[in-house]
Image (cartoon, coloured by chain):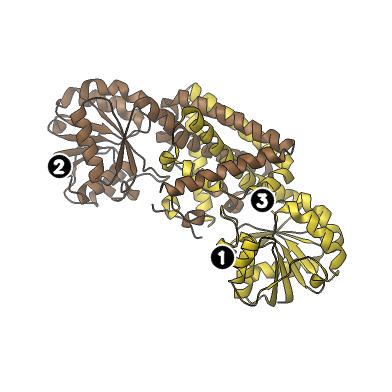
Chain colours: A brown, B yellow
C-alpha cells in the first residue's frame, strides 16, 4: 500500500499498528522512531526487517506515510521537526484521543486526524497486538485534504477497523462522555478508596471483587496519555463533571430521603443501556465479561 | 451435611447455592420457596429431586438449614413467618449485602449473617452457576450463636468459599467503598450519558467501547437488590458520596487550572491499586479482563 512508512512512538497503539501493518502487508519498509531503549529492544524482536530512525532528521524525508502514536504532549516537538522536513505529498496521521487541540497542526501538512477506539489499561510494546484494530471503530475527522483522508481510511480498513467520519466538535463532545469522563470517574473512585484505606488503616483491596476491581482496571491506564486528554478536552470535561455531580447529588438525596420510586426509576433506566451495548456488539454478551477467576 | 435444607428465593444467588449444594452433596432433601412461576419452571429443570414449598407454613418446621436469598426488602415478611414456625435448633442464614439493618432479625432465631462476594450484573435462575462461590470470599458476621456460625462457615467452605469473619460495622463500611459506591457511581455515569444523549439527540452507545461499556455492566445490576442496599447502608453511602464529590471537585480544579504535577500524582497513585488487586487474585491478570470482542 505504501513504499515507506514511519511509526513515531511505539507504545501499545504504535506497536499494534506495527504488527498489524506487517500482517496486512501495508508496506515492505517499516521504520520506527522510539525514544525508549527498553521499548526498542522489545520492538527489535517483533521482526528483523524493522528499521529504526533515532532522530527525526533528513532520513524521514522520503517517507510516504507517517503515523504519530506518541502522547499528545509530544506533538509540538514532533511537528516542529516534520514541518521543515516532510514534503507535501507525504500522508501524516496521528491517533490522539482529542481533536480540537490538534487543529493547529493540520494547517501546513494536511494532517489527517485518526482515533482508533482500541485502547486498554496496559501500555507499551509488550502488549502490542496485531488484532487490536480488528472489528474496532476508528474515527476519522472529515477536515482537510479529501484524497489523503481517503488513503488513511483505506489504511485503517486494511487493519480491520470500521471507519466512521466525524467533525471535531462532535468527536470531542462524544468521547468526553463515552471515554474521558469514565476514565476520570474511575481514577476518582480509586482515589476515594485509597483515602478511605489511609483514614481507616485497612486493606480494602482484598474485598475489591464486589465492584471496585472493574474501576481499578480503567484507573490503571497510562497517566501521561490521560493527563493530555483531560487537559486538551478541558471544556467538555468540566461540563460533563458538573452534570455528573448534579446527578450524583440527586441520587444522594433519593437515598437520604428513601425516595423509593424515584430511585428505582433511575436504576431501571440505566439497566437498558447494557442491552443496547451488547446488541451493538460493543461488548461481549457474557455475564461479568466472561471473566473467570 | 444437613437432612433438610430450604432455599428461600431462587434468583442468581439462590439457584447457584442450589446447584452448588447438589454438586457438593450438602443435603439429600433440598426444598425451594420461590414466588415467580417463570423461575420455578427453570428451577424444575435443574434436578427432578428438588421439592417446592409454596408457602412458608408448617411444611418448613422440620428444616435444619434455611438460607434466605431474597432481596432484603422481603425479610420483614419472611421473618414474620419464620419466627412463629421454626424451632430454635434450625440454622438460618441469609446473603444480604448490608448487615446493620439486619441486626433486628438476629434476636430470636440466632440468624447467621452471610455475605458471599459473588454477585454479577445478571440475575435470575437462568444464570445459576454451581461454581459461583468457588474460590470467592464469603463474609460471616461474628455475632450470635458460635456453634451455628461454625456450621454456616463449614457450609460455605463446602461450596468452595474462603470465609472471613467480620463485625457488622466494619462490614458495612468496607463494602460501602468496595461495592456499594462503585455501583452507585456506575448507575450515575450511565444516567449522565443518557441525559447527554437526550440533550444532544445522539446515539452514544455505538462509541461505548472507549470506557463507558464497563460501567454499563455494573449499572445493569438488579434494581430491587440495589435499592435495598443503598437504603439500608444509607449513612455509609452518604459519607462516601460526599468524599467522592470532594475528590472529583479537586480533579476538576486540577484540569481547569492545568495543574500538571498534581494531576499526574493522583493518576500514578491510582494505577498502583490494579497491581495489588491482581496480586491478591481478586481479578484476572489479563488486559481488558481477557475480553475479546
> Label 1: how many residues lie within 10 Å, few (<14), some (14-19) or many (20+)?
some
What residue did someone put label 2 on? A1
Residues at marks 1 and 2 touching, judged by CB atoms closer than 8 Å: no
Q: Chain of mark 3?
A: B
Report the front residue among A182 and A53.
A182
Could you classify mark 3 by the number of other residues whose Cα lies within 10 Å: few (under 14), some (14-19), or many (20 or more)? some
Q: Residue at x 80, y 66 (%)?
A: B146
Could you say which is closer to the camera, residue A81 or residue A214?
A214
Residue B129: assigned label: 1
In the rendering, at what x and y percent does residue B39 appear?
A: 62, 63
Residue matched to label 3: B225
The reply to whether discs 2 and 3 touch (Cβ–Cβ < 8 Å) is no
Q: CA distance from mark 1 to mark 2?
A: 50 Å
Q: Quadrant of residue A179?
A: top left
Rounded to the nearest angstrom, the CA distance separating label 2 from label 3 is 55 Å
- Above or below for B253 versus B99: above
SS of the residue at dot 3? helix
Between marks 2 and 3 in the image, the one whose residue lies nearer the viewer = 3
Q: Quadrant of the N terminus of chain B?
A: bottom right
Q: Which chain letter matches label 2?
A: A
Query: Crowding at label 2, few (<14), some or many (≥20) Cα neighbours within 10 Å?
Result: some
Would you say residue B225 is visible in this rendering?
yes
Q: Residue at x 61, y 47 (%)?
A: B178
Depth order, front residue of B82/B291: B82
Above or below, comparing residue B266 to residue A234 in the picture: below
Q: Position of residue B11 (x, y in %)?
A: 63, 60
Q: Nearer the viewer, mark 1 or mark 2?
A: 1
The vertical placement of A30 against B171, above or below, is above
Image location of residue B95, percent across then percent down: 70, 59
Cβ–Cβ under 8 Å for marks 1 and 3: no
Task: Let me know if marks 1 and 3 both belong to one chain.
Answer: yes
Amino acid at each position: 500500500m505504501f513504499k515507506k512508512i514511519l511509526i513515531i512512538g511505539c507504545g501499545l497503539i504504535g506497536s499494534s499498528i506495527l504488527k498489524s501493518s506487517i500482517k496486512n502487508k501495508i508496506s515492505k519498509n517499516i521504520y520506527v522512531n522510539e525514544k525508549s531503549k527498553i521499548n526498542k529492544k522489545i520492538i527489535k524482536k517483533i521482526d528483523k526487517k524493522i528499521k529504526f530512525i533515532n532522530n527525526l532528521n533528513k532520513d524521514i524525508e522520503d517517507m510516504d506515510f507517517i503515523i504519530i502514536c506518541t502522547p499528545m504532549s509530544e506533538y509540538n516537538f514532533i511537528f516542529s521537526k516534520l514541518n521543515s522536513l516532510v514534503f507535501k505529498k507525504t500522508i501524516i496521521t496521528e491517533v490522539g484521543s482529542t481533536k480540537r487541540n490538534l487543529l493547529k497542526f493540520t494547517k501546513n501538512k494536511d494532517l489527517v486526524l485518526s482515533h482508533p477506539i482500541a485502547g486498554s489499561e496496559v501500555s507499551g510494546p509488550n502488549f502490542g497486538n496485531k488484532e487490536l484494530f480488528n472489528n474496532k471503530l476508528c474515527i476519522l475527522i472529515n477536515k482537510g485534504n479529501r484524497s489523503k483522508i481517503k488513503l488513511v481510511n483505506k489504511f485503517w480498513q486494511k487493519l480491520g477497523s470500521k471507519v466512521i467520519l466525524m467533525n471535531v466538535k462532535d468527536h470531542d463532545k462524544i468521547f468526553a462522555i463515552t471515554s474521558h469522563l469514565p476514565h476520570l470517574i474511575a481514577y476518582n473512585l480509586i482515589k476515594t478508596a485509597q483515602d478511605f484505606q489511609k483514614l481507616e488503616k485497612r486493606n480494602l483491596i482484598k474485598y475489591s471483587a464486589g465492584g471496585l476491581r472493574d474501576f481499578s482496571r480503567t484507573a490503571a491506564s497510562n497517566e501521561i496519555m490521560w493527563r493530555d486528554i483531560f487537559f486538551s478536552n478541558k471544556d467538555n470535561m468540566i461540563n460533563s463533571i458538573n452534570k455528573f455531580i448534579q446527578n450524583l447529588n440527586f441520587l444522594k438525596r433519593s437515598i437520604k430521603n428513601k425516595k423509593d420510586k424515584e430511585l428505582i426509576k433511575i436504576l431501571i433506566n440505566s439497566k437498558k443501556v447494557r442491552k443496547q451495548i451488547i446488541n451493538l456488539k460493543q461488548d461481549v454478551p457474557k455475564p461479568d465479561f466472561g471473566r473467570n477467576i
